[in-house]
Amino acid sequence: MPHRPTVLGRLFAISRPVLWVNTLGPALIGLWLTGDLWRWDFVPALLWLTLPFNLLIYGVNDISDQAVDELSARKGSIEGARIDPGEAPLIAAGVLVFNAPFAMWFAWHLPLEALGWMAAYAVVFVLYSLRPIRFKGRPFLDGLSNTAYAFPLVFVPLAFGVEPVWPAALGLMMWAVAKHGYDAIQDLDEDREAGVKTTVVAVGVRGTLVWCASWWLASSVAFWLVSPWVALVSGLFAAALVAGVAARPTPARAHALYRVSIAYPYIAGGFAGVLLAASLTLDALR
């Protein structure tokens, strides 16, 4: 008999653990940019940005995208879940059960300014998927809404009474716009067939590559103000990804490079994190 996952196991899979780096990474960088390597009062935010918040992002998206996901050969794998219609109530309940305790904790313990950015973080991701607004089906707004991935660089410092490092936050916002457009290229055919008008559907593969390259270049300029080395690593990786699809501008080529794209935040973010952690450690030893 085929193995049936537990409810928790199924929700864990839907939360895309391979992509948790996109929420945990900015939060850790946001903490380190405050000048602290670690704080125990950071643990609630760190836990929230694992299964609970990623279930909100991807669970809501999977409920909304069932028709498109049925057409996608990559769904039902490490690259994304394919849910049954009957799972929608379970996912919705999971989103509420896992996120509500954190929302109450944050409302009691964090300053209002940080709470505003955290609320915007959640709302933007929900509106990305849910109708009638559904940013995913609105060219250019689909990518611009992904600036929310950088919000931890703002709300984590604010939670501890520290001014955010705005060039880093703005740089990551622009980086996220580009990354969204690049990763959406592989879904061009399915989105077009399902009538979902994404940026890629609107301007094609080559137009999307220009869009992505422009945002990645702008993000590298912002990163340069914080760390030239981070800007260089990020810029070179972005150039390689764009060139890889530009050589054969098709959704199939973008899909072939998707796992390299997944590695991008691990490599660039890891490099930035090591530099920051090393700098803080050396400062503490002086």
Image (tube, grey):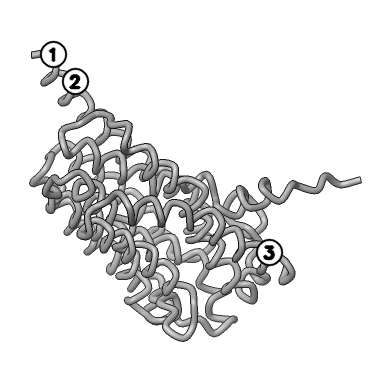
Which part of the image, by quadrant, shows the N terminus? top right
Question: Which residue corresponds to mark 3?
Answer: 83
User: Which of the two discs, 3 and 1, sits closer to the camera?
Assistant: 1
Verify CB contact (< 8 Å) between mark 2 and mark 1.
Answer: yes
Q: Residue at x 68, y 51 (%)?
A: 10
Which mark, residue 48? Answer: none
Q: CA–CA distance between discs 3 and 1?
A: 51 Å
Q: Quadrant of residue 41 in the image?
A: top left
Looking at the image, residue 137 lies above or below residue 42: below
Where does residue 148 sit, x and y in percent of width and height? 31, 62
Question: For the residue marked with disc 2, what is the amino acid?
Answer: Thr
Looking at the image, residue 219 lies above or below residue 66: above
Where does residue 273 sit, x and y in percent of width and height? 27, 34
Question: Which residue corresponds to mark 2?
Answer: 281
Question: Which residue corresponds to mark 1?
Answer: 285
Q: Residue at x 60, y 58 (%)?
A: 94
Dot 2 crowding, Cα within 10 Å, few <14, some 14–19, many 20+: some
Q: Of all residues shown, which one is farthest toward the top? A: 285
Dot 1 crowding, Cα within 10 Å, few <14, some 14–19, many 20+: few
Q: Residue at x 48, y 66 (%)?
A: 250
Q: CA–CA distance between discs 2 and 1?
A: 6 Å
Q: Secondary structure at mark 2?
A: helix
Question: For the residue marked with disc 3, what is the amino acid?
Answer: Ile
**198 to the left or right of 34:** right
Question: For the residue marked with disc 1, what is the amino acid?
Answer: Leu
Comparing 77 with 26, the one in front is 26
